[in-house]
Amino acid sequence: MNWLNFPAWLPENVSTFGQGVDNLFILIYWITSIVFLAVMAVLIVFIIKYRFQEGRKAEYIEGSTTLEITWTAATTVIVFGLAMLSLPQWNKIKFPSQFPGNPGAVVQVSGKQFNWDMTYPGPDGEWGTDDDLELENQLHVPVNEVVHIRLTAEDVIHSFFVPQLRLKQDALPGRFINMWFEATKPGTYEIPCAELCGFGHSGMLGYLTVHTAEDYAAWVNERWGE
Amino acid sequence: MNDHAHESHDHHHEESFVRKYLFSLDHKMIGKQFLIFGLVMFMVGGGLALLFRWQLAWPDKPLPIIGVSKEYMEEGEVTTAADRKWEERFDDDKETWIEVNMPSGVIDPAFYNSLFTMHATIMVFFVVVPLLVGAFGNFLIPLMIGTRDMAFPVLNMLSFWFNMLGGIIMMAGFFVPGGHAAAGWTGYAPLSSVPELSGVDWGQNLWCISLIVMGISSLMGSINYITTIINMRAPGMTWFRLPLAIWALFIVAILLLLAFPVVASALALILFDRMAGTSFFLAEGGGDSLLWQHLFWFFAHPEVYILILPGMGMASEMLPVFARKPIFGYKSMVFAMIAIAFLSWIVWGHHMFQSGMNPALGAAFMTTTMLIAVPSAIKTFNWLGTLHRASIRFTVPMLNTLAFVSMFVIGGLSGIYMANSPVDIYIHDTYYIVAHIHYVVFGGSVFAIFGGIFYWFPKMFGRHMNATLGKIHFWISFLAFNGVFFPMHILGVGGHMRRIANPMQYEFLQHMQWINVFITVCAFILGVAQFLLLFNVFWSIFRGKVAEQNPWQATTLEWYAPTPVPHGNFGAIPQVYHGPYEYSVPGADKDWTPQTEPNGESPHGEPIPAGATAD
C-alpha cells in the first residue's frame, strides 16, 4: 500500500456518522498535502537556485507587507472555514441534545481495570433492577438501529474506542457520559481501551457484536424471553 | 563607566575548580552545565525509548544480549552466557531490580508503562527545556543583548543546581520499590493519584516532587531572563533590534513564569491525594478526575510552545547567516511569536476533546486551536522568504535549520487533523499524535538544537566541531528520524493506540505490525547516530580546530565578543546601531554589517565614498 495515501489506511467504516468523519479527514488530507508539497517545492527550488555561487550576491530584501497580509489572510480563511465546516459533524456525534431518538438498544458500559462491563437494563428499561443483564467484554447491538450508551468507569479513566465506528469517548469515574452510534454492517469489532489505565492497559479489550435484526431479536429472546 | 567595568573584569583572579566549573556564577559556564546535563539526559531518554521500541516490534521477546535465548525460553535449555546468568538470578532468593522489571529479559508491562512515561518526562523536562532554555538561554541572552552577565548570577547558579537536584530525584525513582511513575508524562488522575490503582508507590511521589523542583528551577531562570532582557540591553539595542532568538526566549520566560505555578499546584494536589488522604481527583470523595486534566493542560500547552519557540528563534538566527540575507519580515516574526504565546493560553482543551468535558467547549477550543495555524504559517512563509534570492551556504547548522523548517511544516500540518475535533474522535490517543509531537519537538526543536550546538560551539568552547562528522550525524539522523516517525502517522490512521505494550493483542492492528518492526530498526539507527554527536561535542571541546572571533561572519553581538569569551564578555559594552540581520547590505564593503557598525560605513567608522560598490 502507498505510504503517502493516508485515507487508504483507515479501517472499514461501519457507522452512520463515520463517513462524515472520514470525509473531513480526506479533506484535511488534501489541503495539508497540497500545502506541504507546495512548501517543499518552493523550498527545494530556492535551495537549488539560490545556493552559494561565486560572483553572485544575496539580495537585500527585508520583507513584503503585501505577502504578509496575503498569507495571513489566506491561512485564516482556510482554518476558520475548516472549523466551521467541522462543527456540525462534531455536534452530531457528541451533543446529547442532537442524538437521534428511538434507540434499538440502550446499554451501560463501564470500564474497570481491565475489562468492559456491559449492563443491559432489561425489558423494564431501568438499571439496577432484577432483570438487568451484565456481560463482561461483550456488547451486542442490532444493525441499522440507533444505540444509546451510558459510559462510566469504576476506578481510573478508560476510553471506549471502536475504530470501525469512528467513535471514541473517555469513561470517567463518577460520571455518566452519553453517546450514540448506529452500526451499518453486522459483524464483530474490537473495543480496545484507548486511555492508559494501568499495567493491564494493553490487552484491555471488549467485543462489539452487531447482529442482523433477526439475530438480535433471537439474542434478546434468549435472555429475557417474551 | 564602561571602561571601569572593563578593567575590573579583565583582572579577575584565578578561580578555584569548584567556583569555576561547579558553582559558577558566570552565565556562560552555567549555560555549558545545562548543555552537558541536557546531552547526557538526551542519551538516557533515548535509551529508554529503544527499550520500549524493542517490545513494540517484537512483543514479549527477550531483549538481545541481556535476555535469555530462544532455546532457554522454550525448553529451559541453557545455551548462552545470559541464560546462565538468568539461572543464577532465578535460583537465589533475592529479587533483583532486573528480575522485577525485565524477567528473562522480557519487558514487564508495568515496566513498559514506566519506560514511556519516563522517556517523555525526561525528554520534555530534562532535555529539551534544559537545552533550549537553560543552555542556549543562559549562554546567548547576555551575549546577544550586549551585557556582562545575567541580572541575578546567584539565582542563575541556583537554577542549574535545582535542575540537577530535580534530575537526581527523577532518576532515583527508577530504583524505589513499586517502580517508577507509570501514568504517562501527562500523569492522568486517578491513575496517578491513587497508589493502589497503578501499583506504583514512591515512583509517582518522586515524579511529582522532581517536577516541582524543576518548576522552581525554571521560575528562577525565567525571572532572571525577563529582568535581564528588559533592563540590561546594550545602548542602542531597542526592542525591535533584538535578535529573534532573544525575543523567543523572552516570550518563553514569560510563559514559564505564568505556567509553572499552575502545574506545581496541581502536582501538590496529587501528592496530597497520595499521601494525606485527600480526594481532589477522586469522584467518591467529591473530587473530579477532569480537574487534573484542566490544570495539567493549562500548563502543558504553553509548555509545548516553550519547547518549540526557542527552536524557532534559533532557526531564525542561523537562517539569515547562511542565506546571507536579512530575515524576511522581522516584525511579523516577532508578532507571530507573541500571537502564539497568547493563543497558547486558550487552546488547552484540544487535548481534552474526548475527555468527557462539555462538547460545547470542544467546539470553542477547536476554533482557537485552528487559529494557531495562522502565526505558524506566517513563520514558515517568512523562513521560505528568507531563502528567496539568497546565497545559501550548506554548513552543518544550515542543514539542521533547513531540516527544522521542513519537519516543522509536517508537524504543523499534522496538527490540523487533531485540531479538528470530529477527526480527533478517531485519531485521538493513537500513534498519529505520537508522530505529531515528535515532528514538532524532535524534527523541530531537536534539529534546531543540533544546529545551534554546532553554530555556537566556537563561541562556547573556542573551537569548532568537526564538520564532516557533523554532516554524517545530520544525514543519518534526518533519514532515520523520518524512518521512525513518518510511519507512525500510518499506524495512527490505522487506529493503533498509543501506550499499548503489545499491538499483537489486537486483531485490527496485526496487519500493520511490520511497520512497528521498521520503526524500531530506524529507531536503533537514530539512537546509535547520536553517539556521533556526543563524540563530536566532547572531542571538539579539547581537540577541535581553534575558532576565530567571528567564524560565520555573523552580525549579532555574541560574535563581537572575543573568543574565548572572557569573564564579563565584552571589553567596552558595544553600541548597537541597527537590527540583527543586516546581510548583503547594498553599498557595504562586506556582506555582513555587525550590529556594532553603522550601516553603510566601513568597520573603521568612515563613510563609504559615494559611488563605491560592494565589490
Image: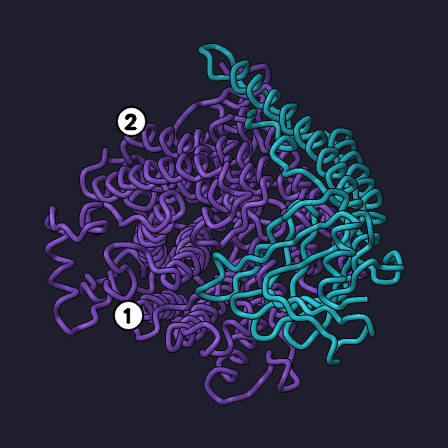
Chain colours: A cyan, B purple
Pick out the residue farthest to the top. Answer: A55
Q: Position of residue B607 (x, y in %)?
A: 54, 27
Residue position for label 1: B175
Q: Position of residue B579 (x, y in %)?
A: 58, 40
Amino acid type, label 2: Thr
Say whether mark 2 and mark 1 are on the same chain: yes
Q: Nearer the viewer, mark 1 or mark 2?
A: 1
Q: Residue at x 51, y 40 (%)?
A: B488
**Mark 1–mark 2 distance (CA, rounded to whole Å):** 40 Å
Q: Residue at x 55, y 39 (%)?
A: B489
User: Where the C terminus of chain A falls, by quadrant?
Assistant: bottom right
Left or right of residue B265, residue A129 in this image: right
Q: Residue at x 67, y 45 (%)?
A: A187
Chain of the residue displaying label 2: B
Left or right of residue B365, residue B291 in this image: left
Q: Position of residue B549 (x, y in %)?
A: 33, 37
Residue position for label 2: B468
